[in-house]
Amino acid sequence: MPDKTKIHTVYKLKDGGRVPSVTTILGILNKPALLDWAWNLGTQGIDYKAVRDQAGGIGTLTHYLIMRELTGEKPDTSEYSAQDIDKAETCLLKYYEWSKVHEVKPLLVETPLVSENYHFGGTIDFYGMVDERFTLVDHTTARGIYAEKIYQVCAYKELLNENNKRVDDIIILRYGRDPTEGFEERDITSSVIGWQIFLNCLSIYNLQNEIRRGE
């Protein structure tokens, strides 16, 4: 089962050096939608941190259920509340709706990869064949497909390419956590600009770390 207390994946180069994750690097970006969301909850007297943590748990569980579906293993959801399971299963049903109209053959599922060239790492949700094309699929339960998600999958594509994996298509699948939130599929037809934005974020992230170290 997904461990809710587990720290984030540690990414290491072949020489043992630790490198940051794609999501950590993109954390330097301003997220106005997130600030607006937190502000709106605050005006209602709602603790945004509690809501955020619950949403994160639902997202983790959704990823886990889809992973188990792809690998054919039985999921263990005993650590989760009935409410969280219900919301994650709602997301899973939306994944079923998508997958039943496609031929899906996984090659990598929830697989960590590291770039020796650029010194960063990331975990691929799904890489495999979708309708006989080599496809990177990223799952999200956010309320929208935001710009940083696009930069994220562009970086994942480069991780796959560097690890000798061909990528024909990139797809982001967004699953609403309740029936009213709906389902969204986004095909990323070009990764060039997204990759360049990520590289600039990586440069800024590294420079900020140099300042912190007093270099």
Image: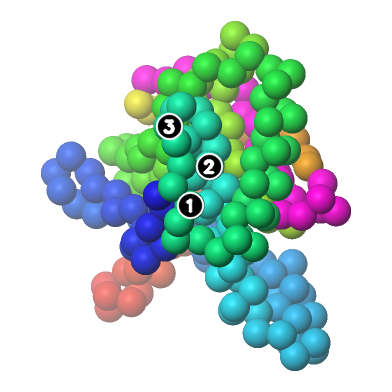
Q: In the rendering, at what x and y percent does residue 186 appear?
A: 74, 35
In the image, which disc is placed on residue 52? none
For badge 2, the amino acid type reads: Leu
Above or below, 24 relative to 34: above
What residue range appears in magenta?
164-182
The Cα atoms of the two marked residues, 3 and 1, are separated by: 13 Å
In the image, which disc is placed on residue 77? 1
Above or below, 134 relative to 10: above
For badge 3, the amino acid type reads: Glu
- Crowding around mark 3 (Cα neighbors within 10 Å: few <14, some 14 to 19, many 20+) is few
The residue shown at (34%, 53%) is 9
Does residue 149 appear anywhere in the picture?
A: no
The Cα atoms of the two marked residues, 3 and 2, are separated by: 9 Å
Circle 2: element type? helix
The Cα atoms of the two marked residues, 1 and 2, are separated by: 9 Å
* Res. 196 image quadrant: top right
In the image, which disc is placed on residue 65? 2
The residue shown at (50%, 28%) is 70
Circle 1: element type? loop
| In the image, farthest residue toward the top | 132
Which numbered disc, 1 or 2, marks the residue closer to the eye?
1
Residue behind mark 3: 73
State how many labels appear. 3
Q: In the rendering, at what x and y percent does residue 152 appear?
A: 55, 46
| In the image, farthest residue toward the left | 15
Query: Closer to the N terminus: mark 1 or mark 2?
Result: 2
Circle 3: element type? loop
Give left or right: position of 176 versus 25: right
Q: In the rendering, at what x and y percent does residue 57 appear?
A: 54, 61
Above or below, 103 relative to 146: above
For badge 1, the amino acid type reads: Thr
